[in-house]
Image: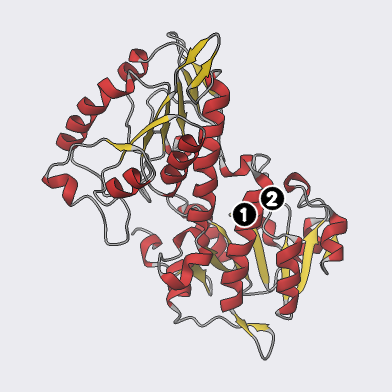
Amino acid sequence: MRISVPSETDPRESRVAATPETVKKLSALGAEVAIQAGAGLTSGVTDAEYAAAGAKVEPDAAATLAGADVVLTVRRPAASALTGVARAAAVISIMDPYGADAALAELAHAGVSAFAMELMPRITRAQVMDVLSSQANLAGYRAVIDGAAEYGRALPMMMTAAGTVPAAKIFIMGVGVAGLQAIATARRLGAIVTATDVRPATKEQVESLGAKFLAVEDEEFQQAQTAGGYAKEMSREYQAKQAALTAAHIAKQDIVVTTALIPGRPAPKLITADMVHSMRPGSVIVDLAVERGGNCELAKPGEVFVTDNGVKIVGHLNIAGRLPATASSLYARNLLAFVDTLVDKEKKTFAPNWDDELVKATLLTRDGAIVHPNFQPKV
């Protein structure tokens, strides 16, 4: 069994799909682990460290992928980049399948079994494999750090001989994994924190972290969560009421962090241009949903944009990748835990149980076809 880890082809991607720690454990499963030379450099891992852990360092992508039974990457690789892998090889990565019909069709045509790590079900058994949580946790932390850096003022209240420095006010919009970590980080840094979310269960979580909860708590709000724990898309009427409540609040904030995402849909617009223009000069908005269209109407992907009234809107892409060493470490462990369930321990071969609920939830393509029910080609 050969497990291959090529370098990421997206120049914006700083993470890597294996670390020396996971290479050792993959080798213990009976795998020969091949790493492309230089694959870990942006995450602070040298080829020598991989070699010391037992990996075979290959000079290029072709040599790395030759004969691969399993390919581990961070982002979905192009089918054209998978030449040389074994027929029916598994490709495991963050596939970003929504709206990627052509790319999925190409992977199916290539004959590989493509697994989307972000579709891992949120059940107890799969917690250690939950890439959305591991990466969103870091994104929430980094968002507050980036916001503080752009803000240019101290966050905690300080009593000095020269006078008192007031605490910064930070508003977190969306209280999933990223939002909760953003709240915790902002609180640790001494800010006055408020937060909002459409899911009623988050109110207690927000308050347990020492922040104040802000929401229109009507009947629709009480039903605003799916069985899987995700936010439902709210009606236009509710969105209008929530916008009216938050508009006055945002005008008084120093830093706003938005984290709201709905799987498979564009990010909901939470901050309008009028709201941005109501904020004080020097205020900061950090939009974690910018890759999905943004929660802020004026956010620009990949840019830190300063409005005409002096508000900074931070639209960094791949926020977790701004902490590449930590993000890679957690992501590689997520992959290791999943691969461990796909290997026959006695024969030391790649032998997934196609009826396993984890496999069914994450498998996109197999035997030349798209097999996931949510991504079937439209007739």
Q: Amino acid at mark 1?
A: Val
Kindly report the distance in space between the C-alpha atoms of the residues bearing marks 2 and 1: 7 Å
Q: Amino acid at mark 2?
A: Glu
Question: Residue 46, how many percent across, how many down?
Answer: 83, 52
Question: Residue 245, how many percent across, how many down?
Answer: 21, 27
Quarter containing the N terminus: bottom right
**Which residue lies at the image location 35% right of the left edge and 58% below the top edge?**
378
**In this picture, is 352 found above or below 298?**
below
**In this picture, is 37 found above or below 70?**
above
Q: In the picture provided, is 80 more to the left or to the right than 171?
A: right
How many badges with numbers are in the image? 2
Residue at disc 1, secondary structure? strand
Q: Residues within 10 Å of mark 1 (few under 14, many from 20)?
A: many
Q: Residues within 10 Å of mark 2 (few under 14, many from 20)?
A: many
Q: In the picture provided, is 195 more to the left or to the right than 115?
A: left
Q: Which mark is residue 74?
A: 1
Is residue 79 at least partly visible in the picture?
Answer: no
Q: Answer with mark 2 or mark 1, whichever residue precedes in sequence.
A: 2
CB within 8 Å, label 2 to label 1: yes
**Which residue lies at the image location 62% right of the left edge and 54% below the top edge?**
74
Circle 2 residue: 8
Instruction: In this rendered view, identify the residue nearer to me: 163 or 89.
Output: 163
**Which residue lies at the image location 33% right of the left edge and 26% below the top edge?**
271
Quarter containing the C terminus: bottom left
Residue furthest to the front: 161
Q: In the picture provided, is 191 more to the left or to the right than 378?
A: right
